[in-house]
Amino acid sequence: MRTLVVNPCKCDLGGLRTANAYAKITYDRNCLSISGVVGPLSSGNCRGSAGQCVDEIRSGEPADGWTREMLDKFCGIWKQWHLNDMRPYCEHQKALGWDKIASKKVTLYHYTLNREAMGKKRQAEQNALAALREGRTFTPTDEQIKYASIDYELTTHKALEGEMAQDYGPRKALYPGGSDFTEEKLLGWIGPDEHPEGILGKPCPVCGYKYGTAWRTEDVPSDVLDWLFSLPETRSVPAWV
């Protein structure tokens, strides 16, 4: 296991106050882990953020022995390679750009049957049951077949138009703060059945691995590791990191 604690910058806390920021770099069993803390205190608390505070550290003022270029490169590596053994994609999917596609936001539309369509659905079902009870042959109309099989709720990747729009209305939230008509999701979190561009569970065209169904390891390049562990070790000892 390789471990290094660095002091890349000082972060602005507001009111002319600053605090040293520290980051712990660990590489063990082919896994790179980086975590940080701004202004750690002996009480176990801190004056700023802790954990994956890469953005706060990136905005800091480089410490002695660091340059802005070094700080930006360090934070870029942190974002790209932290927990490299927890990738949702295989090497082929990454080559196809699925890691970038996964972060694209799309809008989903949620609908529920309107009152009129709900009434037609219930009436079709009641007519079929009545015929069964009376021992009659029931031959449904095309409209009865349609409404008997129609879903109470519907989620689509685009707003409904035409005949479908006549049967459905925008879904309303069941409780304050609940999701209602529209919802934004990342393509990496939805499957092709929810959105044509969704990639969750989509098989790789090369090896067949389904995106997001397991954690895969992506090897950190040796030059990246060499650069990280050549960074200057912190001169001040933090309360914790």
Image (tube, rainbow, N blue to C red):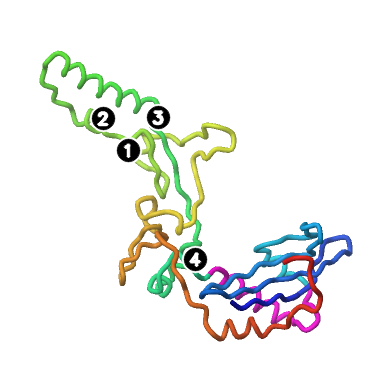
Q: Which residues are magenta?
A: 61-83
Please tell me whether mark 1 sits on a helix, a strand or a loop. helix
Question: Callout 1: few (<14), some (14-19), or many (20+) C-alpha neighbours within 10 Å?
Answer: few
Determine whether 36 is above or below 148 in the image: below
Tag 2 residue: 148
Question: Callout 3: few (<14), some (14-19), or many (20+) C-alpha neighbours within 10 Å?
Answer: some
Q: Which is more toward the observer, 218 or 140?
A: 218
Label 3, label 1: how far apart the Cα atoms are: 13 Å
Tag 1 residue: 163
Label 1, label 2: how far apart the Cα atoms are: 16 Å
Q: Are marks 4 and 2 in contact (CB under 8 Å)?
A: no
In the image, which disc is placed on residue 114?
3
Q: Nearer the viewer, mark 1 or mark 4?
A: 4
Q: Nearer the viewer, mark 2 or mark 3?
A: 2
Tag 4 residue: 86
Residue name at image x 50 percent, y 57 percent: 105
User: Which comes before the other along the chain, label 3 or label 1?
Assistant: 3
Q: Are marks 2 and 3 in contact (CB under 8 Å)?
A: no
Q: Nearer the viewer, mark 4 or mark 2?
A: 4
Determine whether 62 is above or below 241 in the image: below
Q: Nearer the viewer, mark 1 or mark 2?
A: 2
- Looking at the picture, how far across and down is residue 122, in whole percent? 30, 23
Quarter placement of the N terminus? bottom right
Label 3, label 4: how far apart the Cα atoms are: 44 Å
- Looking at the picture, how far across and down is residue 82, in whole percent? 57, 70
Please state if 235 lies on the left or on the right of 228 as rendered.
right
Label 4, label 2: how far apart the Cα atoms are: 45 Å
User: Which comes before the other along the chain, label 3 or label 4?
Assistant: 4
| Identity, as a three-letter code, of the amino acid under mark 4 | Met
User: Which comes before the other along the chain, label 4 or label 2?
Assistant: 4
Q: Nearer the viewer, mark 3 or mark 1?
A: 3
